[in-house]
Image: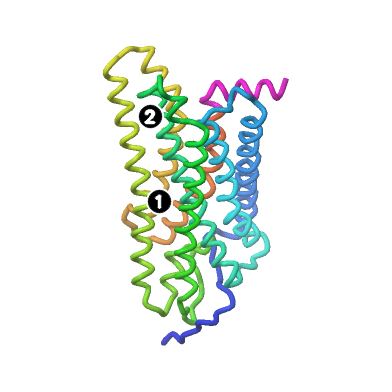
Amino acid sequence: MRRENQSGVSEFLLLGLSIRPEQQGALFTLFLGMYLTTVLGNLLIILLIRLDSHLHTPMYFFLSHLAFTDVSFSSVTVPKMLMNMHTKYKSIPYAGCISQTYFFIFFAAVDSFLITSMAYDRYVAICHPMHYTIIMSQSVCVMLVAGSWLISCACALLHTLLLAQLSFCADYTVPHFFCDLAALLKLSCSDTSLNQLVIFTVGLTTIVLPFLGILVSYGHIGATILQVPSTQGICKALSTCGSHLSVVTLYYGAIIGLYFLPSSNNPNGNNIIASLMYTVVTPMLNPFIYSLRNKDVKGALRKLLI
């Protein structure tokens, strides 16, 4: 059937998760519990950092922003997904879809830059401990966080402005549980070559370069540890970097699964599973990683509870 150009489309239809009716109640409860855990866990991390003076350090300054970003990131997609599962009302207004795309890209990029800033902080702490307070001054930390938010805002705005210029065809069904940029581009009747170029460029800026920065940072950390190979030094490095490495593995592992691994016979299903890991599971696990593997956070939590 020939598609007709409908540039004035008023809404999109989100297909959501492919689940059986008898599984819907259990999955709704599961995802609701995961979302509430994400919100409460990350807000608890922010509260502990604000209240405990021992956590007023650059690492925890970055962590508080990461926790806020994780709450926001999950809130962009999960509440709408839960509402669709509960009410079976799967449509989303055009403006709401564009806004969801913007905030998804925005918070995903902020996450990437903040994780990279935390890697740089660990590099300075281990490789240049005598100059740590000078290099990681308050002004530098504020600049890194502000730069993360500004660059992410610009990247997300560029994507959504280009997306808003596209015309969409009669088929406006999005085979996803949120307005994924790649899925929306497939529905467009317009030439999306410029959009694809921007995806490549922005992906290089917000994902690939930060990831390379993290690898370089940990390469220097590893080289520094090997220069003085002692059990005490290795244990100290692991305690300092272990939590951050776990977050890096979760974050970039989900991205690699979502965008870089080849699809099998069910590409949409694979994308949805990877997206769930990226938007639901990873933000939920971050507070547990930092609280269970970090004695400073556990100490602050003990003080709050006593």
Residue 9, above or below 280: below
Q: Kindly identify the residue that appears in the image at 47 percent across and 47 percent down.
A: 147
The percent position of residue 186, horizontal first and vertical second, equals 41, 71
Q: Kindly identify the residue that appears in the image at 64 percent across and 68 percent down.
A: 89
Query: Tag 2's secondary structure?
Result: helix
Nearer-the-camera pick, 214 or 276: 214
Q: Quadrant of the C terminus?
A: top right
Residue 97, above or below 236: below
The percent position of residue 106, horizontal first and vertical second, equals 50, 55
- In the picture, measured across the screen, residue 40 lies left or right of residue 157, that is right
Q: Kindly identify the residue that appears in the image at 63 percent across and 62 percent down.
A: 84
- In the picture, measured across the screen, residue 40 lies left or right of residue 1, that is right
Is residue 152 one of those drawn in magenta? no
Q: Which residue is mark 2?
A: 123
| Magenta portion: prevailing SS class | helix
What is the spatial separation of the Cα atoms under label 1 and label 2, in whole angstroms?
20 Å
Q: Amino acid at mark 1?
A: Thr
Is residue 297 one of those drawn in magenta? yes
Disc 1 vs disc 2: Cβ atoms closer than 8 Å?
no
Q: Residues within 10 Å of mark 2 (few under 14, many from 20)?
A: many
Which residues fall within the magenta stretch? Answer: 292-306
